[in-house]
Image (cartoon, rainbow, N blue to C red):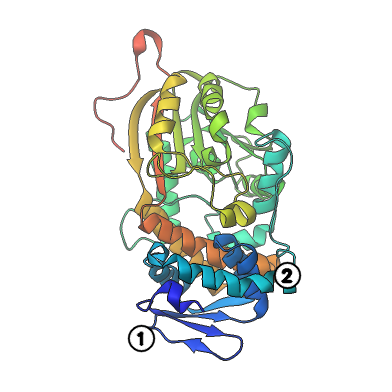
Amino acid sequence: MFRPVLGEQAPITIRAYDGSASPPAAADPVATVDVRSETALAYLASSPNTLGLARAFVSGHLDVEGDLYEALTAMSELTVSDVPPSTLLKMVARLAPLRWRHRIAPPPEEHRQHGRRHSKGRDSSAIEHHYDVSNRFYELVLGPSMAYTCAVYPSAGATLEEAQENKHELVAQKLALEPGMRLLDVGCGWGQMAMHAAEHHGVQALGVTLSRDQATWAQKEVARRGLGDLVEIRHSDYRDVTESGFDAVSSIGLTEHIGRRNIPGYFRFLYGKLRPGGRLLNHCITRPDAHHRAHADAFIDRYVFPDGELLPVGWLVSRMNAAGFEIRHEENLREHYAKTLAGWSANLDAHWDECVQEAGEGRARVWRLYMPACQVGFDLNNIQLHQVLGVKLGPDARSGFPLRPSF
């Protein structure tokens, strides 16, 4: 059924529940797609896109034998647009009866948002869905760094932990952190940037996160490290921070959750939190250009990051600038995020049984699919990761920057 759509050159085998198989053109296929039941086809019939595939995979009715990253890379090279419309119509006609024969609900891991988009309540629900799962699960996948954002690899052979430490230090250098300064870390996750700033630069840091589980874990870690006099981790919406006069603001992986309409106000809010001469480092996933849609793919939206919106870096820079920031530095870390995702995937595979025990098989399968899929996205430049550094100019337009930065 699928071979006419995928094409004769597809380097994968498709094996069906009835024992039939579609051999690949290559002698050594990169993977085998195992369609285990009619339910998998019913999911595809009800949503003939990435959402249908995801439902079939997450529920275990469709699986992939072999390296999932290699399989997704191979499938990304296929051109469905070259398939004649008559072939697609035949496939839809064959699948249609299954939609009515198997009227099944989506897997329980699928999440639908309710309420006004990007209201505080809806944003809290989105964060709870993805992050308040199991801190132990995240420890197993992310590793000891507990950093769920793009690492920065100082060399190709660096470990994930070295790269995450290097990322935090790079942010600290760009913000020119020094003892006695005050840092606001919005969307602080498990608090690692705030703790790094305190431990290595003597900074007084406030981290805020909408995830109760993250805040609880980070507060305990702050106490364990003896940083209670320097670091506060607050379970809060960043919009509820009343303090101001910060020397620096770090926003690492939060902008993707803000929403296009709210971005101008977001940057104005952060600008208002800084003293004159203070710096903002904005680190976020972006689209490569304005031709790519902002809203997340249906699978990512329902299973991973509800209400996520990715915007072109040029658009974001313009809004930062309009909010009052002078832009001083920008860089794309796209390849670094592909390596980071590969490291997380390796951790998940190495601790698969324990991850399933902690979060359930369906949730673990969501991660098994979404991480290599995103890795392919970074490889192919469908998504990027940018760090943008801005400053709130002081009197007489003084930036406080050296003639050449050292980072």
Residue 348, by quadrant, is bottom right
Task: Work out whether mark 2 precedes mark 1 in sequence or the reverse, and give the earlier one.
Answer: 1
Residue lying at 38% horizontally and 33% vertically, measured from the top left: 314
Cα distance, mark 2 to mark 1?
A: 37 Å
Residue 50 screen position, x and y as percent: 55, 61
Q: Position of residue 102 (x, y in %)?
A: 73, 73
Locate the C terminus and report the quarter of the image it occupies.
top left
Q: Nearer the viewer, residue 182 or 332?
A: 332
The amino acid type of the residue labelled 1 equals: Asp
**How many neighbours does mark 1 have within 10 angstroms: few (below 14), some (14-19), or many (20 or more)?**
few
**Residue carrying label 1:** 28
Whether residue 112 is visible here, answered yes or no, is yes
Furthest-left residue in view?
Answer: 403
Q: Nearer the viewer, residue 124 or 113?
A: 113
Q: What residue is pinned by disc 2?
A: 100
Residue 110 falls in which quadrant of the image?
bottom right
Quarter-wise, where is residue 117 in the image?
Answer: top right
Residue at 60 percent across and 41 percent down: it is 227
Instruction: Indicate the position of residue 34 as horizontal and vertical percent values.
Output: 55, 81
Given residues 322 and 176, the one toward you in this image is 322
Left or right of 188? Residue 104 is: right
91 versus 29 height, above or below:
above
